[in-house]
Every structure is written in C-alpha cells, then in structure tokens.
Image (spheres, rainbow, N blue to C red):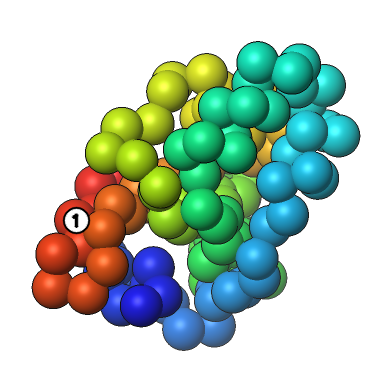
Amino acid sequence: MSASSNALFAYPKQAEFGRVLPKNKIYEHSGANTRLKDLFVAQVEQIVWRYKLAPETINLPAKPGVPEIQVFAIQLKTAELHRDVLRCIDGAVQFPIIFELTQGQGAEARTQV
C-alpha cells in the first residue's frame, strides 16, 4: 500500500511530486548523530515527498515566510514516532512541511497529520 492511498487531503494533481526521499539525504542535510540515525532505522520505513505546494505548481503567490509547503508521507515501522525524527526532517528542509504519518498496512493502516 502506498501512503497516498491513505491521504487525508486532496492536494492538487499538478503539485504531485511523488519521490522517495532517502533517509541518508536527511542525515546529510541535518547533521544527524548516531542516536537520531538509529531512531530513523528503528521507526521509519520510508519517506515519500508527495507534494510541492508552490507558486509554480498551484498557481498561488508565495507569502513572506511561506514561499512553498512540502507534503511528506512517512510510513512507520512502529506505532509511534519520536519527535526528534520530525525535528530532524524539518531542519533538513528549508520550507514548511505537512507530515502524513501512516502506521500499518491495508485495512489496518492508520494515518495522522
């Protein structure tokens, strides 16, 4: 099951990005330490950069402080995600992020924003 099948919002099709974001890229851009890398490995199955809500993709002007918004879908291995993992991702990306966290598969999947 992809994280997109459990979406809570209908984002504009033209804003779809749909790329898997390798965890090691997050580590590189955030300077993650060993403890944080271990949390990623234990708790995060996959990160998908689902949407890029930007002037060129949704035809709305940027606002000061919020030039664009990213939507990341995170498939979890565990029932909970440590806040430091989200802080790490947030620190690695220069734009505001909406996180869609999904735990479980198929009919048992639960997503929260």
Q: Give the left or right position of residue 104, taking residue 2 as reference.
A: left
Q: Residue most toward the bottom?
A: 13
How many numbered badges does the structure rendering display?
1
Q: Quadrant of the C terminus?
A: top left
Q: Position of residue 29 (x, y in %)?
A: 83, 33
Image height of 78 relative to 106, above or below: above
The answer to whether residue 11 is visible is no
Q: Give the left or right position of residue 9, taking residue 71 as reference.
A: left
Q: Position of residue 56 (x, y in %)?
A: 67, 70
Residue at the image position 68 percent from the left and 57 percent from the top: 21
- Nearest to the observer: residue 20 or residue 106: 106
Determine the secondary structure under disc 1: strand
> Which residue is the site of mark 1?
110
Residue at the image position 42 percent from the left and 23 percent from the top: 82
- Nearest to the observer: residue 58 or residue 70: 70
Q: Give the left or right position of residue 69, taking residue 29 as reference.
A: left
Q: Quadrant of residue 36?
A: top right
Callout 1 environment at 10 Å: few (<14), some (14 to 19), or many (20+)? few
The answer to whether residue 74 is visible is yes
Q: Residue most toward the right?
A: 28
Image height of 27 relative to 104, above or below: above
Q: Quadrant of the N terminus?
A: bottom left
Residue at the image position 24 percent from the left and 47 percent from the top: 112
Residue at the image position 27 percent from the left and 67 percent from the top: 105
- Nearest to the observer: residue 110 or residue 67: 110
Q: Position of residue 40 (x, y in %)?
A: 58, 35
**Disc 1 marks which amino acid?**
Arg
